[in-house]
Each structure stands twice: as structure tokens, then as C-alpha cells.
């Protein structure tokens, strides 16, 4: 196998691992399919891609999708660090109404504002952690 082919194979493996981690976070948060699609910036009729990602197929080599996946994992990490003794609270936080978001859930903010909403949620959690 050539060096280029090895690099492509490694990239596919990394994006596959990323897909599994992201969909696992969605499972922890108990998000429905439409919310998961919104978090990844995918069309609501793109359930096929989501099913492939759940099975560990590599995320598409799309900058927006990969950045969103990175933010999902950062949000998940922040929640685990903020609520280390209470996993249930860490996992429920994304679907709980929050004063910081004018009574909306973090998922609602992301659905309404898209990528900017995801950045709002992540930066809020970064500030709570003191970063």
C-alpha cells in the first residue's frame, strides 16, 4: 500500500472513531434523530447518513461536519468535567431549560442558531469551567 493510501485509510479510521464518539454522546443526551441531525448540520431528511454514522461509518470529510463533531465532543467533555459526580445531570443538561439561554434548552439554541448556537453553548460551558 502506498503512503498516500495509508494516510487515506488512517483518516477514514479517525473519522469513523469520531462518528462513534459523537453518536454515543447523542445517546447519552437522549437526543432524537431530528436533534442529532441539527447538531451535525445535516438536513432533516438525511437519516441515512446518521444511520451510517451510528454504525461507525466515517464522517464525511466535510469541514463543517468535522468542526461540529469537535464541538459536540468538547461540550460532552465540559459537561463531564462540570458535573463529575452526577452523570445523570451531565447527560440531561443538553435537554434542560437554562436561564443562560433565555429558558431554552441548549439543543433548542443549536437548532435555532445552527453553528453559531453550538458555539454559544460551548463558550457558555467553557466559561462555567473557567476557560
Image (tube, rainbow, N blue to C red):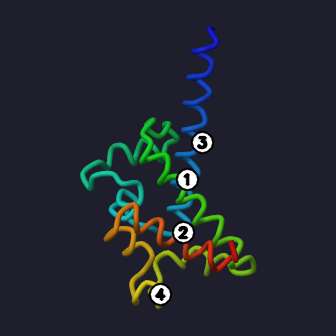
- Check whether the beta carbons of the residues at disc 1 and disc 2 lie within 8 A of each other: no
Q: Position of residue 88 (x, y in %)?
A: 62, 78
Question: Which of the 4 quarters of the picture holds residue 81?
Answer: bottom right
Q: Is residue 74 above or below residue 130?
A: above
Residue that label 1 marks: 70
SS at mark 2?
helix
Residue that label 3 marks: 17
Q: Position of residue 15 (x, y in %)?
A: 55, 38
The residue lying at 41 percent from left, 54 percent from top is: 40
- For marks 1 and 3, give the CA distance: 12 Å
Which numbered disc, 1 or 2, marks the residue that appears first in the sequence?
1
Q: Residue furthest right?
A: 85
Q: Quadrant of the N terminus?
A: top right
Q: Nearer the viewer, mark 3 or mark 2?
A: 2
The residue lying at 42 percent from left, 39 percent from top is: 62
The dot on residue 122 is 2
- For marks 4 and 3, give the CA distance: 31 Å
Q: Nearer the viewer, mark 4 or mark 3?
A: 4
- For marks 1 and 4, give the CA distance: 23 Å
Amino acid at each position: 500500500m502506498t503512503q498516500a493510501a495509508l494516510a487515506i485509510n488512517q483518516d477514514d479510521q479517525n473519522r469513523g472513531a469520531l462518528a462513534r464518539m459523537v453518536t454515543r454522546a447523542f445517546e447519552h443526551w437522549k437526543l432524537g434523530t431530528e436533534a442529532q441531525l441539527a447538531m451535525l448540520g445535516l438536513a432533516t431528511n438525511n437519516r441515512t447518513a446518521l444511520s451510517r454514522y451510528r454504525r461507525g461509518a466515517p464522517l464525511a470529510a466535510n469541514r463543517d461536519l468535522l468542526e461540529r463533531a469537535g464541538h459536540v465532543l468538547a461540550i460532552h467533555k465540559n459537561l463531564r468535567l462540570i458535573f463529575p459526580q452526577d452523570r445523570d445531570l451531565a447527560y440531561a443538561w443538553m435537554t434542560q431549560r437554562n436561564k443562560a439561554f433565555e429558558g431554552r434548552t441548549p439543543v433548542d439554541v443549536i437548532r435555532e442558531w445552527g453553528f453559531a448556537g453550538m458555539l454559544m453553548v460551548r463558550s457558555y460551558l467553557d466559561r462555567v469551567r473557567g476557560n
